[in-house]
Amino acid sequence: MNGGSSLNYLLLGFFNILWTPMAMKLGRKPVYILSSLLVIITMSWSRKMTGVTQWFINNLINGMGTAGYQATIQLTIFDMFYVHERGRMLAVYLFSRDLGAGIGLISGGRMNDTMGWRWSQVLVGIMTAVAVVVFIFAFEETLFPRFLFTDDDQNAINDDGHKLEYITKDVLNEADTKKNHAITNNIQRNH
């Protein structure tokens, strides 16, 4: 049991190398759905598995799945709330997660005594399947460039009361070209 849990936690921490960039590039919703589908697969498999090897492989795949939504929740909170609200919302999330872990231990013990430990896996799979359906139909993507839809930045005024001019790629390329010519001319004069 401990070896399988260790493998689960190992991939839970390591697999964020894949999920977090995917959430930043493709969006939060696909990561939630894909990672939850991995969890559903492992929970369905755990009902029928036999042997230590299957337990280890199951926990490896489960760690890959749970890593996705464990890391993406914080990104979603950062997308949905203003900076001054994020601390409170992260505290609510962490409190809820830890409270769920405590309640899960108590209810899991009761379930183990009455129906057997495999049913706890099935129940997690069912709850995750319900969450996937909710994600598909009720969850809006939180990753989008808000600055493109606000007019505040385009009317920004500096401390002197002058309207700010935004630097475009053309201006940057022109400045780089002038700088490169100046460096080349300086080198030629010195030699």
Image (cartoon, rainbow, N blue to C red):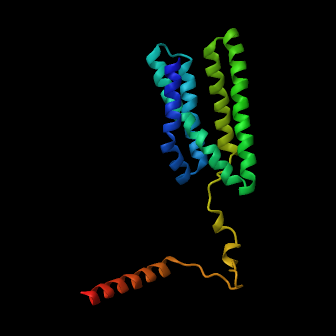
Is residue 176 positioned above or below 46 on the image? below
In the rendering, at what x and y percent does residue 4 appear?
50, 22
x 65%, y 53%: residue: 142
Residue 81: image quadrant is bottom right
Q: Is residue 82 visible?
A: no
x 48%, y 28%: residue: 60
The residue lying toward the viewer, choosing from 191 and 158, is 191
In the rendering, at what x and y percent does residue 73 appear?
64, 44
Residue 41: image quadrant is top right
Is residue 130 positioned above or below 26 on the image? above
Of the 4 image quadrants, the one containing the C terminus is bottom left
Residue 150 left/right relative to 182: right
In the rendering, at what x and y percent does residue 83 appear?
71, 56
Q: How many marks?
A: 0
Residue 49 left/right relative to 141: left
The residue lying toward the viewer, choosing from 53 and 94, is 94
Looking at this view, name the residue that lies furthest to the left.
191
Residue 177 left/right relative to 47: left
In the rendering, at what x and y percent does residue 186 appear?
33, 87
The residue lying toward the viewer, choosing from 191 and 53, is 191
Looking at this view, name the residue that lies furthest to the front.
190
Is residue 77 positioned above or below 127 on the image? below
Looking at this view, name the residue that lies furthest to the top.
114
x 70%, y 81%: residue: 159
Residue 166: image quadrant is bottom right
Is residue 129 positioned above or below 120 on the image? below
